[in-house]
Image (cartoon, rainbow, N blue to C red):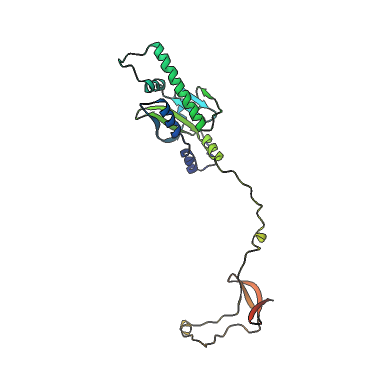
């Protein structure tokens, strides 16, 4: 199927995936239920199809969160909680029922912690199969030490993008931007007069001394060019003397 990528570029999606803080949730759950063995995330999240479509047991939260279990997850969780019988005997039906109930409570607690971590504490988990059409999904593997996966957490990319957007700071409406002419009204600029030019050779320039006179290419009575910010502009002025200062008169 063709997937229309979200408004985020790929590198931003990957950053949003890294910011999903699932590891503290898994470690706190592990510390609360398993004294002798630790459960943690294994490897980095990977993009692909929803892994729950290949699992027999899974739970779905809201739209875009799926928790899938390995086929022996219940038994492994119960074994990590209580250990196996010392004589290697199979558990009795009553023991089996008690272990299953304990594993179910443990998994229910993890689902509750996961929902709170994702900010979906008010939503209800639904057991059952999951449609595979919403791709891609990002999957986190939960494993017991170096063993095979115990659980897999899958989040749709669409959900991850929604979380990234919700985490953005609110747009603050400021003052209306003034027109450019008004915004630059107080900007100070340098205005100067280009009184004239004279051409010299480098030898003549090197030989200049105090008292030498340079003849410019402009009459004394002619208007001169105006420069703004040292750039000539289509303005003309005359240079006059007032008291002990020079003044420019635009003509």
Judged from this view, the residue extending furthest toward the left is 87
Quarter location, residue 145: top left
Q: Residue at x 45, y 26 (%)?
A: 68
Horizontal and vertical percent for residue 130?
Answer: 50, 25
Q: Position of residue 64 (x, y in %)?
A: 52, 31
Q: Could you tell me how many numbered marks the image carries?
A: 0
Whether residue 130 is visible to the viewer of this picture, yes or no, is: no
In this view of the protein, which residue sits in the foreground, 145 or 31?
31
Q: Residue at x 42, y 27 (%)?
A: 32
Q: Position of residue 53 (x, y in %)?
A: 47, 26
Q: Position of residue 69 (x, y in %)?
A: 43, 24
Residue at screen point 42% across, 31% down: 27
**Residue farthest to the right, as pictured:** 251
The reply to whether residue 108 is in sight is: yes
Q: Nearer the viewer, residue 53 or 121?
A: 121
Out of 168 and 139, give the one closest to the viewer: 168
Quadrant, the C terminus: bottom right
- 172 to the left or right of 129: right
Whether residue 237 is situated above or below residue 83 in the rendered picture: below
On screen, residue 37 versus residue 63, left or right, reads left
The single residue placed furthest to the top in the displayed view is 93
* Vertical order, 20 against 151 (above or below): below
Residue at 62% x, 64% y: name it.
Answer: 187
Direction from residue 239 to residue 156 in the image, left or right: left
Examine the rendered structure and indicate whether residue 8 appears above or below residue 141. Answer: below
């Amino acid at each position: 199927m063709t997937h229309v990528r979200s408004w985020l570029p790929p590198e931003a999606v990957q950053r949003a995936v890294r910011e999903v803080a699932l590891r503290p949730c898994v470690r706190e759950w592990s510390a609360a239920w398993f004294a002798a063995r630790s459960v943690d995330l294994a490897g980095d999240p990977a993009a692909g199809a929803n892994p729950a479509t290949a699992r027999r047991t899974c739970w779905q939260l809201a739209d875009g969160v799926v928790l899938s279990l390995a086929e022996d997850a219940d038994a492994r969780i119960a074994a990590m909680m209580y250990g196996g019988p010392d004589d290697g005997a199979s558990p009795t039906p009553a023991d089996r029922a008690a272990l299953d109930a304990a594993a179910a409570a443990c998994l229910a607690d993890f689902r509750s912690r996961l929902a709170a971590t994702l900010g979906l504490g008010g939503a209800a988990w639904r057991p059952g199969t999951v449609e595979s059409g919403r791709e891609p999904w990002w999957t986190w593997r939960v494993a017991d030490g170096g063993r095979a996966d115990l659980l897999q957490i899958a989040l749709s990319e669409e959900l991850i993008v929604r979380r990234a957007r919700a985490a953005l700071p609110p747009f603050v409406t400021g003052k209306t931007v003034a027109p450019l002419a008004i915004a630059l009204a107080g900007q100070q600029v340098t205005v100067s007069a280009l009184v004239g030019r004279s051409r010299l050779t480098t030898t003549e320039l090197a030989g200049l001394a105090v008292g030498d006179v340079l003849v410019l290419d402009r009459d004394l009575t002619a208007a001169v060019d105006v420069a703004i910010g040292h750039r000539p502009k289509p303005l003309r002025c005359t240079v006059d003397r007032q008291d002990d200062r020079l003044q420019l008169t635009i003509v």
